[in-house]
Image: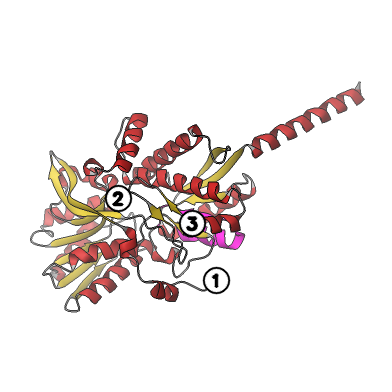
Amino acid sequence: MRRRHFLGAGLALTIAGIANTAVAQSEIKIGEINSYSLLPAFTEPYRKGWQLAVEEINASGGINGKKLVVVSKDDGGKPADAQTAANELVSSENVAMLVGTFLSNIGLAVSDFANQKKVFFLAAEPLTDAITWAKGNRYTFRLRPSNYMQAAMLAEAAAELPAKRWATVAPNYEYGQSAVAVFKKLMSEKRPDIQWVDEQWPPFGKIDAGPVVQALAQANPEAILNVTFGADLVKFVREGNTRGLFKDRTVISFLTGEPEYLDPLKEETPDGWIVTGYPWYSIKTPEHDVFLKAYQAKYNDYPRLGSIVGYETIKAAAAILAKANSTDPEKLIAATEGLSVSSPFGEITFRKIDHQSTLGAFVGKTALKDGKGIMVDSAYKKGSDYLPRDAEVEKLRPKE
């Protein structure tokens, strides 16, 4: 009886092992990491976006006949936790690639992990230029338009302003530092006559808006570059409105036209800021119409920019896996370099030279309508039009 019991148990384990192997062979796993608990305003729409993409991909036959499975982890806004999550996804979940991240310092941490462990990583949201240039590596690609690209779009409009005295305010970490540095560089090249009269560097998520606004006012700039976002942006705008900081001053602002940052401002939305963003209500293209209808049908809600990023991250990842027809990192890299894919904003390409996608952004102005902030006079700027020449990129990016 005991021998039969052991034989039965052994047979059960063997069958279970065969079944698990069969399941593994019939699906492809992607490991996804983001700051869900820290930044829900962006990451919840982002999660809805990628979940919609997974649903669509599997409904149309998966990836070369295999079901797509996304295993998601929360990094809590901490680089060390993101690296731990990445290690668990690779070693325990056997994911084919890593995708995601939001904050620039976390994106760099996961990129470093990917480089060391030779794992393919598609960065979704982090905007620092370092991720594809100064600290770029062969295993890391990026979807969103970088700080350089968005700064170039904004500087194009800002250079036309008569303002000569400029001040800046940005969160004091990788993203804010990178955004300010590249905007100042591009603006100074276009307008050698301008002066930079003040810089404010509040800690991310902990802005003390009163002293920041007071310091900016004392510097008496004619224009201000703003890089704050989220709760910091709300506090900065509220205090700036109260103290009259924005009266007769132009503000150029990264990201403020994205619904996740514009919506919380409500009736406090400043008028006439020049911003990058996502005016989903005024985009009239076939590609966006398809996405918008599908998103609204599934969630009974309007998309945020995070929704676009999450959706396109997984759509691009699936296209990469399908083209490579392999989970080997080297084959994934070869498949991605130069790959063109569709998106709700039109076709985009992952450049071979620096692994940056050519996804663009909308530039327009803020306005108040029915007690809510919107973007007006907006236009889509193709990412490919706002990237430096190859010779400059080769100087910025380390040699392999």
Report whether 302 appears left or right of 43.
Answer: left
Q: Residues within 10 Å of mark 1 (few under 14, many from 20)?
A: few
Q: Residues within 10 Å of mark 3 (few under 14, many from 20)?
A: some
The N terminus sits in image quarter = top right
Q: Which residue is located at x 30 percent, y 33 percent?
A: 301
Q: Nearer the viewer, mark 1 or mark 3?
A: 1
The residues colored magenta run 107-126
Q: Amino acid at mark 3?
A: Pro
- Residue highlighted by disc 2: 230
Q: Is residue 306 shown above or below 127?
A: above
Report whether 16 appears left or right of 1.
Answer: left
- Residue highlighted by disc 1: 400
Q: Which residue is located at x 18 percent, y 65 percent?
A: 158
The Cα–Cα distance between marks 1 and 3, rounded to whole angstroms, is: 25 Å
Q: Residues within 10 Å of mark 2 (few under 14, many from 20)?
A: some
Disc on res. 79: 3
Q: Amino acid at mark 1?
A: Glu
Q: Secondary structure at mark 3?
A: helix
Disc on res. 75: none
| Residue 111 magenta-highlighted | yes
| Residue 114 magenta-highlighted | yes
> Would you say the residues marked 3 and 2 are in contact, meaning their CB atoms lie under 8 Å apart?
no
- Residue 384, given in percent of the width and then of the height, sits at 34, 61
